[in-house]
Image: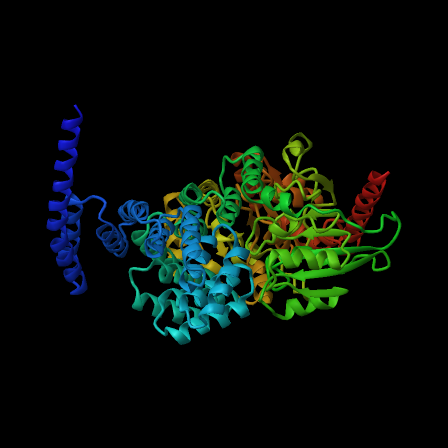
Amino acid sequence: MSNSVGQRAFHNARLQKRQKADVLPLLGQALQLHKQGLIAEARTAYRLVLQLAPNQFIALHMLGSLETDAKNYEQAEILLSRAVVVDPQSADAHMGRGIALNKLRRHDEARESYRRVLALRPNYAEALSNLGNASVTLDLKEALACYDKALAIDGNLAEAHNGRGWVLYRLNNFDEALASLNRALSIRPNYAPALANRAGALRELLRFDEAMADCNRAIALAPDDMSGWLGRAGVSLQIQQMADALHDCEKALEIDPEAARAHLLRGVCLAELGRVQEAIASFDRALEIQPDLPSAISNKIFTLDFLADASVELHQQARRVWWEQIGANIAAEAARPHDNNRDPDRPLVLGYVSSDFNAHSAAFIFKPVLQYHDRDQFEVVCYSCSSKLDPATEEFQKIADRWRDASQWSDDRLAEEIRADGIDILIDLSGHTKGNRLGVFARKPAPIQAHGWGHGTGTGLPTIDYLFSDPVAIPAEVRHLFAETVVDVPCFVTLEPLPIELAQVSTPAISNGFVTFGVFNRVSKISDQAATAWSRILERVPGSRLLIKDVALDDQLVRDNLMARLASCGVPAERVELLGKTLRIDHLAAYNRVDIALDPFPQNGGVSTLEALQMGVPVVAKLGNSLPSRAAGSILTAIGLPDWVTDSEEGYVDIAVSRAAELGDLDRLRGELPAQVRAAAACNPVSYAQAVDEAYRAMWKRYCDSAA
């Protein structure tokens, strides 16, 4: 028996010796082909080597590198994993494996590979830079530290400057991000990823022409790299060029169908075009790929406002996803006590956080709240989180007792500054809209936190204590679904008085001979259900017309898309007029062309509803189930026009038709309406702010009592 085993061992040794003799010339040939750039032939030769000697390290390593170059990352990872088993001391093989793993989005495993490299070569700058790349989606602070260490070793490593710039961009430090990206491009002028990243920072700084130029150059240099296409899509979105943005998203997805950010941006484009179901599907796909992508969750939350059958429960469940995936982890790491003086009667410091302290519709809503606080009882601190500065910003700067430019602060820094400023009650004015800083509110830097006015539909954050609303917007029977405690004020929104006294005109139909219905809402709010109701109204009111106004209508794709949708719902094109962007004074004056405003549904108007009423134009509204579909009903009830609100499409059509038939009554109402609006607590800035002041004091006393 032992003799047989010995013979077999001798035979195997001879076989291995013969294989090695056969393999070495073939391996030399493969390496020569590789060196000559004959890649296909080299790959074939390496595979032949591995058929003869499956554990031949050089062949595994070289073929793995070629598969990485060919973007066959799964095959590359398999080969390089075998290579590091054969030679665990090969830093280069661990490095190659890390690159393949990172491309496969297996970032934790990639980080481990890079750490193995650094254990073998502690001062390997490129490995530190790659460790930063793998850490970006997991820990921005660690990524930044890796890039800084790499650059301390090799200050000319363009990849590290690029990575550092991308992390600083993600941390909202756009100026410093630009400096890093400029350095990367000074080293490698044709570095496409750095151009795409710089475009993102330039876009945030509102330097759109420069951002677009960088994107175009990145695409020209590397058309098969999705970063340039996605960068350009982001710029096009911000300057309202929907056709271009959607095209570039599709190009990015052709290159990488698994790119979560491409699905996200595509969803934003589709939502802007009113293609709600498709938009939500895109956000869901992004979240399948990256479940903790904050902007995908927030955009889905915002887009659910436009979904006809979305219940309050569905809306709040979507908000809970943000908390479970993102907020809870932040809160667990940031929990700290507060040392604010618990005197129930002392003056309080209020902190307002928003990216909309500028000429934004949300600012028209919350400006009266800030402006008319009792300054003997409340100090106002504004944390401005946007680079956009305009005359409206200057007005907010005058209103604030302290103005804090937080536009380039990370969430960590903003939270620390809020604590240092001694904020007693911190108010979120954005909800899940663009530019929100919910990550700060998850850290709970103030003892009391509240949300309202900017989006006003709830955040889903248990760290936000209160939500300002009213009994129509959020009925008692659904309040248990909200993470926040609902606090009632005269109306869930208000609006600053008209900027100047505009001349009121009599009912336009009296002189025109036809009734004009107006829709001055975002095009994305126009649902097929609403358009079908408008079609029935136009049919029943002979000769009537529909005037639709929105800044997005300057985009030809948006116009064409809207007209096609209206036609499919039976709205005659010849009875529709579209208006785009104008100065606000001209926007308000355009209401003088409207007899009756038609509020869209399921998402109602907010600012547009209040503006119409201020201008003397009554509004027909349909009451739905979710808060966004109850906004107009809340406003009309608050100013004393509940009979213009209904809970059915049939009732909506009947109100519009019957009111259009009674021009005398309509004319009297239009004459009385502006004064009626000014008298209502919902739109009287002084009385509204007084109600809010009382709510803040009650919150604070409740907090002080809880200490006992």
Residue at the farthest bottom position: 186
Q: Specify the quadrant of the image occupied by residue 462.
A: top right
Q: Position of residue 321 (x, y in %)?
A: 54, 39
Q: Residue at x 16, y 32 (%)?
A: 6
Q: Position of residue 535 (x, y in %)?
A: 44, 44
Seen from the viewer's position, the closer of residues 661 and 601 is 601
Please determine whether, in this image, residue 192 is positioned above or below residue 265: below
The answer to whether residue 209 is visible is no
Quarter of the picture holding the C terminus: top right
Q: Position of residue 586 (x, y in %)?
A: 57, 66
The answer to whether residue 368 is visible is yes
Q: Position of residue 288 (x, y in %)?
A: 42, 41
Q: Is residue 644 left or right of residue 255?
A: right
Residue at the farthest top position: 1
Q: Residue at x 71, y 65 (%)?
A: 403
Seen from the viewer's position, the closer of residues 308 and 119 is 119
